[in-house]
DNA sequence: TGGGTATTTTGTCTTGGGCAAATATGCGAT
DNA sequence: ATCGCATATTTGCCCAAGACAAAATACCCA
């Protein structure tokens, strides 16, 4: 890129990095980085190189590193942190997943769509979600954290998976279905894919999902549960959602919600929870969703008609 | 609504209204409105009523009114200004829209879906978007600002509209199409419905949309544009996106993007922009999208095969 | 090893002032 | 009246330095 001498004002850096203006200024004051140039007005102008480094730092922070440490490091040490991250990943037919990951990395979205579709048909929704979609989403998340793929590749992948699920749900006209289940996430949790997968599973399992989409405040969840007469409120949490907010949110919701409405909490984000929360059923794996369904139906057999 | 005594901290008000923290504080200092309560820490807590009024003021500003005047007015005078422009969308009968609004208010989502679908079939995608979907979205936004509906009703409505568009796009296998158009929003802009409507229109108009979903940083938009070899980058802005961020973002993108890639900016959010931005085509209405398409094809007739 | 307490660390909010770009206003000429 | 231009006002963003509480870490003891 020829824009070596390009520099961005603080508002642009805020948009690009996700770090607030206040944070950028306070870092400069406390840690001595970044040190932007100044224009004639005395206002900050961040060189493009510093912006890139800030993006890298933000990514490492999302991975759990603390700013105080990161901001002391030089470029080489930062890069060194970026690469490693030994982890063990799932047990599914790795080669197949590898092949798909390669499609994601090369952002070949024309090729992705038909392959997904074929795999869905072959395995059926339930197994497709558990064996293909969920592991893939996990690996894409990991790859993004390690800087092996960019935001763009991740977006393209998510869009096509979303399209796939929505196409699969097309034309399935719901009328009745026994547990009526409200689907949403708490404010701040933006990830929709988890909800979509649950909706797909519930639909084929003859439940009645009511999809609200992401980010519903607790008071509105309560209103919705009453208005739509649901039996269960199901929430999805990704790994990036702060653990304490998860606990707090679930506790608050349990308190606010009528006791005869169950709460199910699923997603990678709830695997991290040590302690159970009273009155909340944890669904760390998709397999547990089926168990929860069976359990609910068993319990409510007598009560209903 | 039970949330009478609810109050929001300044960051939430910024998110809800699209008015920056700085602006909120400087209005308080200069015009004496809003005057938020303070918590134990001395930090601002905006009553929900003031937030709604701020949303209304922002809407009127987007329409060309100046803050200095608006902030002197009382509630009645504000409502008087607000009402007249309600019927800007002539094509679909107002009664029809009223009927749909009643479905939204009563969160009757079982009834909504088939009606939407029938209207889409009857009018065709192009007219459905312009005469039904866009006006309805606008009215739902206004109803929310006036506290006539809650978040829950708004979410349910959005979900079903989204489902509708995604179903409509099902099975339309794209191979080629002349302007290749990247669809996304800038970081911070979460609204997806605008993008979906554009994708639907572009598809039926035989263009080649590449949907990235919301919130792509500028550097990634540039990468995506190169990788997918697009001719146009199309961005969508809702009214709640801060105006200055819109201008700054478009300017930054124009600078970062290769000159032979056009930039189109659409959505209610760009109606507020007074001045044109060099190298960026404004698409305030959906009708302008067709004009833009025709224009592009005309210009690039000679260059291509 | 688990659990509770002290101690950093860290992000967000506060105030009040300054400045330039956008917009309105006034005035003279056509 | 209406246009053109110069002057005045409005308006939003940025700056600085300080304060404070929530989160994360370190520490200690059972």
Image: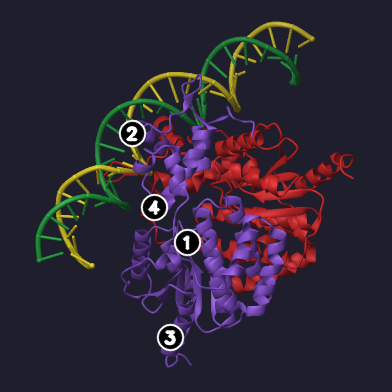
Chain colours: A purple, B red, C yellow, D green
Mark drawn on residue A216: 1
Q: Are labels 2 and 1 on one chain?
A: yes
Chain letter of disc 3 in the image:
A
Give me the residue at 65% from left, 70% from top. B113
Pointer 3 residue: A295
Q: Are labels 1 and 3 on one chain?
A: yes
Label 2 to label 1: alpha-carbon separation? 37 Å
Of the image marks 2 and 3, the number of the one nearer the N terminus: 2
The quadrant where residue A73 appears: top left
Q: Residues within 10 Å of mark 1 (few under 14, many from 20)?
A: many
Of A188 and B287, the residue lying toward us: A188
Which numbered mark, 2 or 3, is in the foreground of this view?
A: 2
Which numbered mark, 4 or 1, is in the foreground of this view?
A: 4
Q: Residues within 10 Å of mark 3 (few under 14, many from 20)?
A: few
Of the image marks 3 and 4, the number of the one nearer the N terminus: 4
Pointer 2 residue: A30
Q: Residues within 10 Å of mark 2 (few under 14, many from 20)?
A: few
The N terminus of chain A: image quadrant:
top right
């Amino acid at each position: 890129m020829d824009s070596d001498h390009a520099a961005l004002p603080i508002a642009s850096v805020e948009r690009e990095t996700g770090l607030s203006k206040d944070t950028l200024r306070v870092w400069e004051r406390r840690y001595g980085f970044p040190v932007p140039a100044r224009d004639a007005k005395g206002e900050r102008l961040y060189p493009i190189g510093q912006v890139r480094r800030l993006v890298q730092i933000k990514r490492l922070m999302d991975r759990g590193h603390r700013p105080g440490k990161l901001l002391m490091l030089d470029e080489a040490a930062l890069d060194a942190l970026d690469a490693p991250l030994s982890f063990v990943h799932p047990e599914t037919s790795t080669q197949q997943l590898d092949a798909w990951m390669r499609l994601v990395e090369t952002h070949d979205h024309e090729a992705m769509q038909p392959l997904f579709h074929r795999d869905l048909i072959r395995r059926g929704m339930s197994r497709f979600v558990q064996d293909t979609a969920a592991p893939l989403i996990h690996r894409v998340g990991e790859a993004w954290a390690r800087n092996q793929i960019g935001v763009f590749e991740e977006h393209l992948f998510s869009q096509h998976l979303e399209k796939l699920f929505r196409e699969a749900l097309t034309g399935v006209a719901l009328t009745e279905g026994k547990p009526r289940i409200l689907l949403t996430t708490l404010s701040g949790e933006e990830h929709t894919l988890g909800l979509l997968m649950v909706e797909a599973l519930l639909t084929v399992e003859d439940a009645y999902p009511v999809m609200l989409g992401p980010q519903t405040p607790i008071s509105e969840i309560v209103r919705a549960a009453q208005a739509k007469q649901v039996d269960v409120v199901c929430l999805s949490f990704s790994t990036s959602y702060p653990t304490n907010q998860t606990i707090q949110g679930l506790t608050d919701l349990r308190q606010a919600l009528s006791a005869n409405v169950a709460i199910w909490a699923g997603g990678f984000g709830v695997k991290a929870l040590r302690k159970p929360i009273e009155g909340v059923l944890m669904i760390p794996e998709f397999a547990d969703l089926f168990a929860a369904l069976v359990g609910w139906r068993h319990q409510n057999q007598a009560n209903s008609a």
